[in-house]
């Protein structure tokens, strides 16, 4: 399901225009793909921020009465405020298959004495543009140290094909490392020895 947004076509460019656009609570964006000339638009700020909270968001853009179906390919954010400064959109058609990176969420609790280390946070898949998964889950419930989860172990929705190497390590379940009490005590006492060393040198 796509989010519908009203977009304004723009012909002005540059940092000054971008600042004015953001000051008006709009977001500069560009739509490209299918060999067509890029379309530069301004999107409504609040509605767009809500729509792109999910990865690979599908948007239906109304540009002067003409609808454009597009997916979010890249979002540029302000490094400090984390506000959206620009969005790259890829135009798509219904039924068309596209390649996207999908986040992997790890669920479940590993066995006692083990810890789950996530080695890959996304995998690449091919799916229909109008049926893109927003996330994929892998369970480590009850996994013991030494067990692994590979990309091939991820359950994919119907119509979604894995493009990442099936042998890619996604989760490594390892033995939990505990710090011995005497090591912790030694580390805590270390700073206290410094004054004694200073006194000895003074003598």
Image (tube, rainbow, N blue to C red):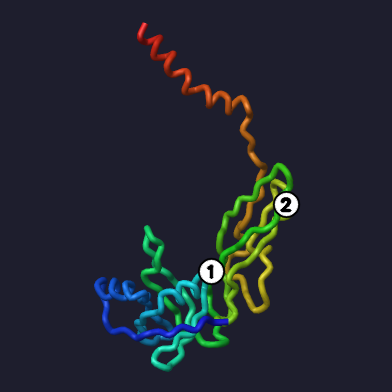
Q: Residue at x 36, y 74 (%)?
A: 25
Residue 18, quarter of the rendered image: bottom left
Residue toward you, 185 or 168: 185
Q: Rounded to the nearest whole Å, what is the CA distance between mark 2 and mark 1?
A: 26 Å
Residue 93's place in the image compared with 58, above or below, is below
Residue 62 x, y percent position in the rendering: 44, 88
Element under disc 1 = strand
Q: Residue at x 71, y 42 (%)?
A: 113
Q: Residue at x 49, y 81 (%)?
A: 59
Left or right of 123: which side holds 34? Answer: left
Pointer 1 local density, CA inside 10 Å: few below 14, some 14–19, many at least 20: some
- Residue on which disc 1 sits: 101
Residue 30, quarter of the rendered image: bottom left
In which quadrant of the rendered image does the C terminus lie?
top left
Left or right of 41: which side holds 166? Answer: right
Q: Which residue is situated farthest in the bottom direction here? A: 65
Pointer 2 local density, CA inside 10 Å: few below 14, some 14–19, many at least 20: many
Residue 166's place in the image compared with 64, above or below, is above
Q: Earlier in the sequence, mark 2 or mark 1?
A: 1
Left or right of 179: which side holds 141? Answer: right
In which quadrant of the rendered image does the N terminus lie?
bottom right
Residue toward you, 43 or 168: 43
Residue 137 x, y percent position in the rendering: 65, 64
Residue 164's place in the image compared with 21, above or below, is above
Element under disc 2 = loop
- Residue on which disc 2 sits: 143
């Amino acid at each position: 399901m796509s989010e519908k947004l009203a977009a304004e076509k723009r012909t002005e460019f540059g940092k000054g225009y971008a600042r004015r656009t953001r000051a008006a609570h709009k977001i500069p964006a560009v739509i490209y793909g299918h060999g067509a000339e890029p379309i530069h638009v301004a999107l409504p700020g609040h509605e767009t921020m809500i729509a792109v909270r999910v990865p690979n968001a599908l948007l239906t853009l109304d540009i002067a009465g003409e609808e454009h179906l597009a997916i979010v390919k890249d979002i540029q954010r302000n490094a400090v405020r984390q506000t959206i400064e620009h969005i790259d959109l890829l135009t798509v058609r219904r039924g068309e298959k596209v390649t996207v990176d999908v986040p992997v969420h790890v669920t479940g609790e590993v066995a006692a004495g083990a810890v789950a280390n996530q080695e890959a946070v996304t995998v690449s898949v091919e799916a229909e543009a109008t049926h893109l998964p927003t996330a994929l889950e892998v369970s480590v419930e009850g996994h013991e140290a030494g067990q692994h989860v590979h990309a091939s172990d991820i359950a994919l929705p119907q119509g979604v094909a894995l493009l990442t190497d099936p042998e890619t390590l996604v989760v490594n379940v390892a033995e939990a490392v505990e710090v011995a009490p005497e090591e912790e005590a030694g580390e805590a006492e270390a700073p206290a020895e410094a004054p004694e060393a200073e006194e000895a040198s003074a003598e």
